[in-house]
Amino acid sequence: MQPLNAYQGIIIPFNRTNIDTDMLLPKQYLKSLESFGFGDFLFDDERYLDPGEIDTPIASRRANPACILNVPPYDQGGVLLAQANFGCGSSREHAVWALRDFGVRVVIAPSFGDIFRNNCFNNGLLPLQLAQQDIDALFEQAQKQPGVQAHINVSDRTLRVAQLSFVFDLDEGRQQRLLNGLDEIGETLTYADKVRDYENWRKLEEPWVFRA
């Protein structure tokens, strides 16, 4: 996956609490066996005026002009701003894939569903958690300046939006995985040589373990 360090993107303000994974990507799209191609279905129930399935041509569907994702410049946004408990509900990783495929690399909220948060890190997205007063300030800025961009620096753990600036918490392990474009499996594979060396050592020191 792509590394994430210095990033900037237009803020998409979703001023709601408890946005769950079914809202992010409805259940009918979980039938796909691929892990890409979900961007057109993000917030599907709100984004279109008619229902769809995984094989419904997007060109045949009627876009909802009231949905912010269909309105410039938010249709090109890369930073989603929301309220508490974002990504609650079922554990579907597809919800993160839909955000990623739409072009979102950062989600800012005061709290996240635990599994959703882990899925973000494992797919190169940053779930950036701030205090409620800071979230309120960001919504005020986004309302005052539509299309305002957020500037995120993962190395420094900083967020800047217009004249506002924040420092966010991020543990070092997850920070390094984002910077290097690694999920947990990818990080483990960086130790492959050491694992092989240990296996070879055990075969020499404890050969009885490996006898058929």
Image: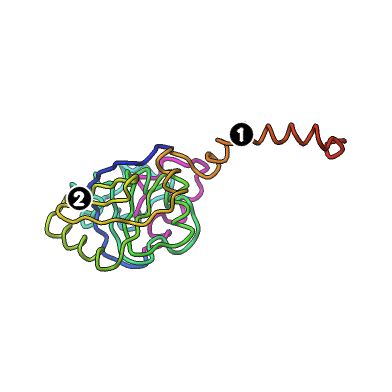
At 37% from the left and 54% from the top, the residue drawn is 127
The secondary structure type at the circle numbered 2 is loop
Residue 28 located within the stretch drawn in magenta: yes
Above or below residue 177? Residue 127 is: below
Question: Who is closer to the viewer here, 103 or 72?
Answer: 103
Q: Horizontal placement of 189 versus 9: left or right?
A: right
Q: Horizontal placement of 148 versus 1: left or right?
A: left
Point out residue 172 in the picture as x, y percentages from the top left corner.
Answer: 44, 49
Amino acid marked by disc 2: Val
Looking at the rendered image, the quarter that the C terminus falls into is top right
Residue 67: image quadrant is bottom left
Q: Residues within 10 Å of mark 1 (few under 14, many from 20)?
A: few
The secondary structure type at the circle numbered 1 is helix
The outermost residue toward the left is 144
Q: Which segment is the magenta one?
A: 19-43
Amino acid marked by disc 1: Ala
